[in-house]
Amino acid sequence: MLSNYGVDFGLVAIYLFWGFFAALILYLRREDRREGYPLEDDGSRRLQPAGGAMFIADPKVFRLPFGQGTVLAPNDKRDDRVLAYKRTSVTPGSPSEPTGNPLIDGIGPAGYAERAKRPELDAHGHPKIVPMRVATGFTIAKGDPDPRGMEVLGLDGEVAGKVSEVWVDRPEAYIRYLEVSLTGGGQPVLLPITGALINKSKGKVVVDAITAAQFADVPRLEKSDQVTLYEEERVVAYYGGGYLYATPSRQEPLL
């Protein structure tokens, strides 16, 4: 419909919508490049050009809650860990193979990120994931098996130790880890509940990720009553790597 001045307000509205939508897409594409950028070349590790205003957002300071400091993103910090691995080919994107202990080398399914060395906090500033000896208000639901005291078996059927404690996520009211006291002694280790099969009738916990002997190298915690984001990453990566690296047969083709 035309006004007295010959302006099509319907067409103007469409143009304004298109302009707004294009600006929104540009904004979102810039914001989603705050972490992991600039990219680096797979072979030489040379940093790729960041591009211009349409490629990456300007650095922004994020203030973490409960006085945990600040984070600047994007930034030019690189992962400078020295990992024990070798490339299988010079072709970009080719896989890498671990050259040491594959469960802790940080390669393939055992890879882990350099997360913050502090515990994840709940809405009140307290560590989310703690053992039940700290979360005294939590109990095992009636009718559910209590794994404490059960033997833990590796994929080889051998006994790795016994469950000595249960670690819970307080805000989620969910079991996250089992604490395992090893047969050989030493500091207990964490076992992700998602990697544990609790057999109530036999009173055993079966783990198909690693062998009983490989429990000895599970990354330990710095503190006995809390787990940091970095430690969680290491622990989960260790068991995840076992599905490929625990035994030589797992690394062979299925067909």
Image (spheres, rainbow, N blue to C red):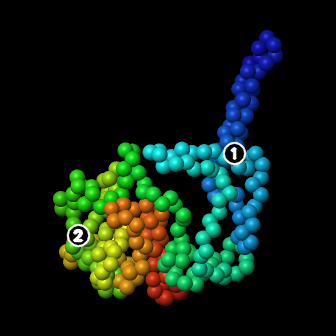
Residue at (54, 84) in percent of width and height: 100
> Alpha-carbon distance for marks 1 and 2?
51 Å
The amino acid type, in three-letter code, at marker 1 is Asp
Q: How many marks?
A: 2
Q: Is residue 197 above or below residue 127?
A: below
Q: Tell me residue 117's x, y (percent).
A: 48, 60
> Where is residue 56 shown, x and y percent of the image?
71, 49
Asked if residue 134 lies left or right of residue 248, the reply is left
Percent coordinates x, y for residue 144 in the rendering: 21, 63
Residue pictured at 72% horizontal, 29% vertical = 16
Q: Is residue 233 visible?
A: yes
Query: Could you tell me the amino acid type at mark 2?
Result: Arg
Res 199 seen here: no
Picture residue at 54% right of the left edge, 44% below the top = 63
Residue of label 2: 148
Along the viewing direction, whichever of 178 and 95 lies nearer the viewer = 178
Q: Is 72 rendered above or below residue 180?
A: above
Q: Quadrant of residue 179?
A: bottom left
**Which element carries disc 1, helix, strand or loop?**
loop
Q: Residues within 10 Å of mark 2 (few under 14, many from 20)?
A: some
User: Which residue was labeled with disc 1?
Assistant: 58
Residue 116: x %, y % from top left: 50, 58
